[in-house]
Amino acid sequence: MIREFQTSDTEQVMKIWLSGNEDAHPFVPDGYWRSHFHEVQKALLQSKVFVYVTDEKILGFLGMIDNYIAGIFVAKNCRSCGIGRQLLTYTKQKYDTLSLNVYQKNSRAAAFYGREGFSVLSEGMEEATGEKEYTMVWKKSGSVPNK
């Protein structure tokens, strides 16, 4: 089941966030994610977050800031089981356009977004890590761009 984030979800969500970032981004210096833990935890409470829950256990989540996907994270033992796709499909039903940034070295994530209909809008450099990233966008079929 997918539902909106509740404050009581914070601990489970942050564990998934930390392990997901450390696993998917071995090229980012050690300690980077842990040094941003409290900042992200605070931002969670100000963002739109959808969580995937089974038997009262959070197995994944997707965080939004306006039309920007801040990230999709799935518990380690549940990756490649369709949870990320379900979260993204759910979100696509609520928005006409979505954008995100993904590290170029995270080829698995970039390929996932490509399969899900996102296209590369631009390439850039994330200043905090010095890593190259893609900005990717998705538009609902038949949607009219915002003016």
Image (cartoon, helix red, strand yellow):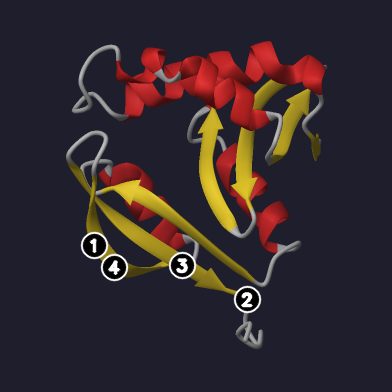
In three-dimensional space, the C-alpha distance between marks 3 and 4, rounded to whole angstroms, equals: 9 Å
Give whichever of discs 4 and 2 has the lower sequence position.
Answer: 4
Secondary structure of the residue carrying tag 2 is loop
Residue in front for this viewpoint, 98 or 113 = 98
**Residue at left 29%, top 12%?**
31
Q: Name the residue under label 4.
A: 122
Label 3's element? strand
Q: Which of marks 3 and 1 is nearer the N terminus?
A: 1
Identify residue type, mark 2.
Lys
> What residue would you read off at disc 3?
137
Q: Quick check: marks 3 and 4 in contact, CB under 8 Å?
A: no
Question: Where 26 sits versus 98, above or below?
Answer: above
According to the image, label 1 marks what residue?
A: 123
9 versus 49 height, above or below: above
What type is the residue that disc 4 sits on?
Ser
- Mark 3 vs 4, N-terminal side: 4
Mark 4, Cα crowd under 10 Å, few <14 / some 14-19 / many 20+, is few
Q: Nearer the viewer, residue 83 or 124?
A: 124
Q: Which residue is drawn at 69% across and 55% down?
A: 91
* Residue where numbered disc 2 is placed: 140
Tell me the distance, in whole angstroms, between the alpha carbons under discs 3 and 1: 12 Å
* Horizontal and vertical percent position of residue 137: 46, 67
| Contact check, label 4 and label 1, Cβ < 8 Å | yes
Question: Who comes first in sequence, dot 1 or dot 2?
Answer: 1
Q: In which quarter of the image is residue 89?
A: bottom right
* Mark 1 neighbour density, 10 Å: few (under 14) some (14–19) many (20 or more): some
